[in-house]
Image: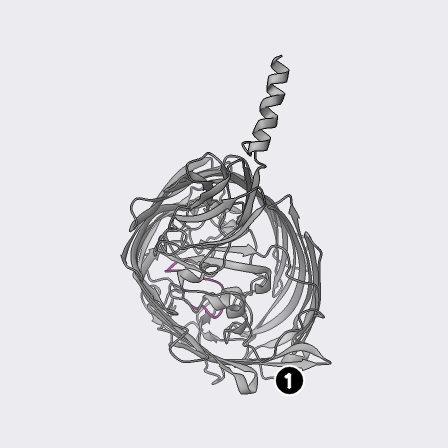
């Protein structure tokens, strides 16, 4: 009888529509700039039916509700949105957009010390095209970032020197994993270049202070590189230039893409044609190759594998103050790098991002009759859990990471003898971190977090709290500040001599004002940074571990200003950056506190790019200025008391869009230091004073050539989307 009554009830319910067919709701949520938004709470108002968007901004859920309903979207830092929908049993697919609260987290709120290239709303945008078309950068990520405030252009190194910090105080992360050897091998007075091409990345975050607890091991700054996901389309690339040739092939399937590339560099013809300031016994040459696999797993997961190898060698003859008049330095460098990451949404609003990276760098250096070989092997792993649905006004990030690193160095005083000295160390470092972004009111938001690390080599641990707040002053402006502690293990060269040191430490305080409206950005940032426990040693007894200690200290303070304009003049975009730096420190071989040799008190960059439609050409210019840097003059009393001339450089370039053999082609021409200004980076002094004068002879350290000229032809073979030569390259 009960079964009969139940069957009758179901029949009546079906007939009356009480058991209507469920409705599937799906869609993609984006911000105003068209970027996908992960972690958005999407639910039907007044019900428990709903879900969260995945890492690609996609949501999908079903409901048994019928008739008119209201779909609610909420996410920290964005205005809650209500969308009317009709539920009739038919699938409902909605493309949705959310407006950010004008200065919410993830927009410009915690901008203290940060310039983000992956988000237009944060203003100081250096995307892939910017890096490729900035005059003087020659498609090098670090060189382009050196036009932003907070950096000092150190021409003899080519690396990133941030707010009075040495180059090793700025670390690079790729997809959340620490990169051990970001720069290609180099020797003193020959600038290094980054190993990775800018086309590999969809966005970069360059933080010059007060950065997130998600990153560590950097006293001054962090460069976070985010690689592209699936390639947009299948295409082939061919590159022909005055210094290298290359080829690439990208294949795109429905859920997978594979890209391979290879190139060969040889500067022998180039150095033979153009005047040089040095004598190349063997001009730089080398080769590299890479492979990148991306695969979408499930509805929103993403697996990425990137591997690259490179090899280079050269022998350079540099002016010397010794009686011979010239010193010869030879370099051989081989590097292998593998990066594998995976990200995916989980249940309950959580998502995971994890990865592992392997690297090996073999650097063989021959200064005159000596030999110094350094082999570094590293394994890096990381797991990050994020819950963007923890609350309507806050989220939560939890993570751990580990680093295993072995460094071995072999020193051979004379190549003609078999005597060798070998030192090595093994580091096992672990870290954990937690961070939350929160919105206190519609105009006040912040970020708080902390990071703990333990080094097995040092036998020490540290705890680094960090906090940031921001207040929206008007619809287009905000004020933000950040404060935190930052730790870093001493440099490898120091640990090879004395592994029983302690963490070096810095404390950052940053205050920022930002105005961003209608393609115009103004950012002013003041900062104060103190250093403690810096490593010191006796410069006259470098290999004596007993002279090493952590008694060094210092400070850096200043003001950075950035103005960028994309709209005032049609087809013209430009930015002007200025940095004021006041810094002193005592570290390494410094006997007293002094201005570091890599710090300039004033730094100015002016970058402009102008598109001429009638010529199908993008013209670019960069002017850089650095006030006199210090150096240690052995012929005078005091320390770091010498003053160099100012640094100045004017670079020009042009990119012409055309078709070659029916294929989209860019012809690129650039010239660095077109005025051939004789910049001086420092001096080399003789090891002993001259017997007749009692003075130390010296020679100036200058660029390897008066100017750098480059001509390249880049052909893109793409049958479906061949490219439009009448549109400005984006």
Q: Is residue 383 visible?
A: no
In this rendering, the answer to whether 471 lies above or below 51 is below
Q: Which residues are magenta?
A: 153-165
How many numbered markers are drawn? Answer: 1
For the stretch drawn in magenta, what is the main secondary structure?
Answer: loop
155 in magenta: yes
Q: Is residue 489 left or right of residue 272?
A: left
Q: Is residue 417 visible?
A: yes
Q: Is residue 593 left or right of residue 234?
A: left
Q: Looking at the image, which residue sits at the far top?
A: 1
Q: Position of residue 663 (x, y in %)?
A: 70, 77
Q: Position of residue 288 (x, y in %)?
A: 68, 63
> Closest to the observer: 564 or 160?
564
What residue lies at 37% left-to-right and 60% top-to-bottom? 163
The residue to which callout 1 is attached is: 273
Quarter where residue 54 is shown = top right
532 in magenta: no
Quadrant that contains the C terminus: bottom right
Q: Position of residue 500 (x, y in %)?
A: 47, 40
Q: Is residue 285 left or right of residue 343?
A: right
> Closest to the observer: 76 or 359?
76
Quadrant that contains the N terminus: top right
Quarter where residue 515 is shown = bottom left
Q: Looking at the image, which residue sits at the far bottom?
A: 614
In this rendering, the answer to whether 486 lies above or below 704 is above
Quarter where residue 170 is shown = bottom left
Q: Looking at the image, which residue sits at the far right?
A: 661
């Amino acid at each position: 009888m009960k079964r009969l009554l139940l069957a009758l009830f179901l029949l009546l319910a079906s007939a009356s529509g009480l058991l209507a067919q469920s409705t599937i709701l799906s869609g993609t949520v984006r911000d105003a700039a068209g970027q996908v938004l992960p972690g958005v709470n999407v639910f039907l108002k007044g019900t428990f039916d709903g879900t969260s968007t995945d890492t690609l901004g996609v949501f999908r859920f079903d409901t048994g509700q019928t008739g008119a309903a209201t779909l609610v979207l909420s996410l920290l830092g964005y205005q809650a949105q209500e969308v009317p929908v009709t539920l009739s049993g038919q699938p409902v697919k909605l493309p949705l957009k959310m407006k950010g609260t004008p200065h919410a987290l993830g927009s410009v709120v915690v901008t203290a010390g940060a310039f983000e290239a992956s988000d237009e709303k944060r203003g100081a945008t250096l995307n892939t095209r910017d890096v490729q078309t900035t005059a003087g950068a020659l498609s090098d990520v670090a060189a382009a970032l050196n036009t932003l405030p907070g950096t000092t252009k150190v021409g003899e190194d080519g690396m990133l020197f941030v707010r009075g910090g040495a180059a090793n105080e700025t670390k690079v992360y790729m997809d959340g994993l620490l990169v051990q050897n970001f720069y290609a091998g180099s020797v003193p007075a020959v600038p290094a270049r980054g190993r990775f091409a800018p086309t590999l990345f969809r966005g970069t975050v360059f933080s010059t202070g007060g950065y997130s607890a998600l990153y560590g091991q950097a006293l001054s700054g962090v460069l976070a590189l985010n690689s592209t996901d699936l390639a947009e389309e299948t295409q082939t690339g061919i590159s022909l230039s005055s210094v290298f040739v290359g080829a690439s092939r990208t294949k795109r399937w429905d859920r997978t893409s594979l890209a391979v590339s290879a190139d060969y560099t040889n500067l022998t013809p180039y150095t033979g044609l153009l005047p040089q300031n040095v004598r190349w016994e063997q001009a730089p040459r080398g080769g590299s190759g890479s492979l990148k696999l991306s695969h979408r797993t499930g509805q929103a997961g993403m697996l990425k594998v990137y591997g690259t190898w490179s090899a280079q060698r050269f022998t350079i003859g540099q002016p010397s103050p010794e009686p011979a008049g010239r010193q010869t330095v030879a370099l051989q460098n081989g590097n292998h790098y593998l990066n594998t990451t995976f990200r995916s949404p989980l249940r309950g609003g959580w998502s995971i991002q994890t990865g592992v990276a392997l690297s090996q760098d073999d650097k063989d250096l021959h200064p005159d009759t000596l030999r110094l070989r350094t082999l570094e092997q590293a394994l890096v792993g990381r797991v990050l859990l994020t819950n963007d649905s923890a609350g309507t006004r806050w989220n939560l990030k939890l993570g751990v990471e580990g680093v295993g690193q072995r460094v071995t160095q072999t020193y051979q005083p004379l190549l003609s003898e078999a005597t060798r000295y070998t030192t090595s160390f093994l580091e096992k470092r672990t870290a954990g971190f937690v961070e939350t972004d929160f919105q206190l009111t519609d105009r006040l938001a912040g970020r708080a977090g902390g990071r703990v690390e333990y080094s097995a080599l040092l036998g020490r641990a540290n705890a680094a709290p960090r906090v940031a707040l921001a207040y929206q002053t008007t619809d287009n402006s905000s004020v933000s500040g950040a404060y935190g502690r930052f730790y870093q293990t001493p440099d490898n060269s120091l640990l090879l001599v004395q592994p029983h040191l302690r963490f070096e430490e810095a404390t950052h305080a940053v205050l920022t004002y930002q105005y961003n409206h209608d393609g115009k950005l103004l950012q002013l940032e003041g900062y104060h940074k103190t250093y403690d426990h810096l490593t010191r040693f006796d410069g006259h007894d470098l290999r004596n571990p007993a002279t090493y200690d952590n008694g060094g200290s210092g400070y850096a303070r200043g003001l950075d200003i950035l103005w960028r304009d994309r709209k005032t003049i049609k087809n013209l975009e430009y930015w002007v950056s200025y940095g004021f730096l006041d810094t002193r420190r005592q570290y390494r071989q410094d006997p007293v506190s002094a201005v570091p040799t890599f710090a300039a008190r004033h730094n100015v960059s002016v970058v402009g790019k102008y598109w001429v439609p009638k010529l199908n050409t993008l013209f670019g210019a960069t002017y850089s200025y650095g006030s006199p840097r210090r150096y240690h003059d052995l012929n005078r009393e005091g320390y770091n008391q010498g003053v160099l001339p100012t640094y100045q450089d004017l670079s020009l370039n042009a990119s012409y869009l055309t078709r070659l053999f029916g294929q989209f082609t860019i012809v690129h021409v650039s010239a660095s230091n077109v005025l051939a200004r004789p910049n001086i980076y420092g001096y080399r002094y003789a090891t002993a004073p001259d017997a007749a004068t009692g003075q130390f002879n010296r020679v100036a350290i200058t660029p390897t050539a008066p100017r750098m000229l480059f001509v390249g032809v880049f052909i893109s073979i793409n049958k479906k989307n061949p490219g439009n030569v009448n549109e400005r390259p984006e």
